[in-house]
Every structure is written in structure tokens, then in C-alpha cells.
């Protein structure tokens, strides 16, 4: 994902979107670190029209994150924060 996003950034194309990313605090360390790395990279490119929210949900793991992550993500991308 990091390489793909970096190539996209190099193309200097507009990126109008709303995105939500989440991982659980009890997921594998790699999953959380990947989320934080990807978020930092995207934020560093300062896309003008991108609204992105990235969170680590407390007390969630890979099997339990879906309900909370889905509902929070849907509210964010639909503008219902």
C-alpha cells in the first residue's frame, strides 16, 4: 500500500475522497504499525481534497473490530460524524 500510494502521489492527480481506516488495539503489532505508517505517509502528502480519519480502537482485535469500525467508518464517510 505504501508503494502504491507513493506512486499515486507522484502522478500529482487530485484525490477527492473521504476515507476511514481502523485497527484494533489487540491486533498484531504489524497491523497497527502498518495503519500508522500508511496514515503518516498519506498525511505527509497533504492531498487537498482528501478527508481521512484513522484510528486504533481500544479493546478490539481482528475478529471484533468489524461492528465498531464499520459503523464509525460509515458515519465518517457519509458525513454523519
Image: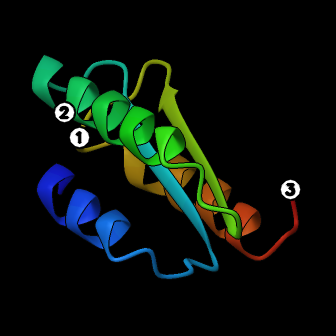
**Marks 2 and 1: CB-CB under 8 Å?**
yes
Looking at this view, is 1 or 79 the one in front?
1
Quadrant of the image containing the N terminus: bottom left
- Disc 2 crowd rating (10 Å Cα; few below 14, some 14-19, many 20+) is some
Q: Which residue is mark 1?
A: 62
Q: Nearer the viewer, mark 1 or mark 3?
A: 3
Residue drawn at x 13%, y 56% is 3
When asked about the image quadrant of residue 18, the answer is bottom right
Q: Secondary structure at mark 3?
A: loop
Percent position of residue 46, x then y:
59, 49
Looking at this view, is 14 or 78 the one in front?
14
Quadrant of the image containing the C terminus: bottom right
The numbered mark at residue 81 is 3
Percent position of residue 73, x then y:
60, 60
Percent position of residue 55, x then y:
53, 34
Q: Secondary structure at mark 2?
A: helix
Q: Which residue is mark 2?
A: 31
- Disc 3 crowd rating (10 Å Cα; few below 14, some 14-19, many 20+) is few
Looking at this view, is 50 or 33 the one in front?
50
Residue drawn at x 31%, y 66% is 10
Q: Is residue 11 above or below residue 59?
A: below
Amino acid at each position: 500500500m505504501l508503494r502504491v500510494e507513493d506512486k499515486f502521489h507522484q502522478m500529482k492527480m487530485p484525490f477527492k475522497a473521504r476515507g476511514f481506516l481502523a485497527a484494533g488495539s489487540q491486533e498484531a503489532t504489524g497491523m497497527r504499525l502498518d495503519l500508522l505508517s500508511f496514515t503518516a505517509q498519506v498525511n505527509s502528502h497533504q492531498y487537498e481534497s482528501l478527508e481521512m480519519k484513522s484510528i486504533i480502537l481500544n479493546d478490539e482485535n481482528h475478529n471484533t473490530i468489524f461492528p465498531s469500525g464499520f459503523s464509525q467508518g460509515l458515519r465518517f464517510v457519509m458525513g454523519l460524524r
